[in-house]
Amino acid sequence: STADGAVWSWGGGIYGRLGHGDRQSQMLPKKIEAFLARRVVAVSAGSVHSLAFTATGAVFAWGQGETGCLGHGEDLSNQLLPK
């Protein structure tokens, strides 16, 4: 994340791992709009999923959910947007 709490992503969009609501690849950094009203203080990116931690203590995950790596309980679906 940046000093103002924004999160940017780019690269391959498979599984929705970029957090833009689609599976499109991004050749240039693009701000993740789901975090516009939140201040993200930490991000961890895996090969097919990512996690973000906000200043209020909320945790968001997105990308491939098939193996439960997003922490969404019984919901093993891929998440195209941070949830």
Image (cartoon, rainbow, N blue to C red):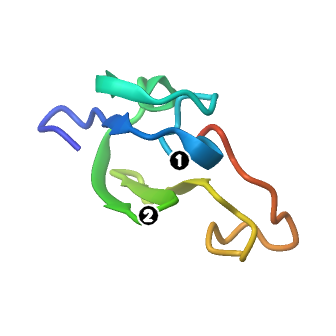
Query: Whole-Å distance between the Cαs marked 1 and 2?
Result: 8 Å
Q: Residue at x 52, y 38 (%)?
A: 13
Is 36 displayed left or right of 72 in the figure?
Answer: left
Q: Is residue 29 above or below residue 51?
A: above
The kind of secondary structure element at disc 2 is: loop
Identity, as a three-letter code, of the amino acid under mark 1:
Arg
Q: Is residue 1 above or below residue 28?
A: below
Q: Residue at x 64, y 58 (%)?
A: 64
Identity, as a three-letter code, of the amino acid under mark 2:
Ser
Q: Is residue 11 above or below residue 75?
A: above
Q: Is residue 53 above or below residue 26?
A: below
> Toward the viewer: 35 or 49?
49
Q: Residue at x 69, y 47 (%)?
A: 79
Reading the image, the residue beneath label 1 is 17
> Toward the viewer: 83 or 57?
83
Is 72 displayed left or right of 13 in the figure?
Answer: right
Which mark is on residue 47?
Answer: 2
> Toward the viewer: 13 or 77?
13
Q: Residue at x 46, y 59 (%)?
A: 51
> Toward the viewer: 17 or 36?
17
Task: Estimate how packed mark 1 is, as few (under 14), some (14 to 19) or many (20 or more) residues with alpha carbons within 10 Å.
Answer: many
Is 9 displayed left or right of 76 in the figure?
Answer: left
Q: Position of residue 43 (x, y in %)?
A: 32, 57
The kind of secondary structure element at disc 1 is: loop
Q: Position of residue 61 (x, y in %)?
A: 56, 56
Q: Quadrant of the N terminus?
A: top left
Of pointers 1 and 2, the one earlier in the residue sequence: 1
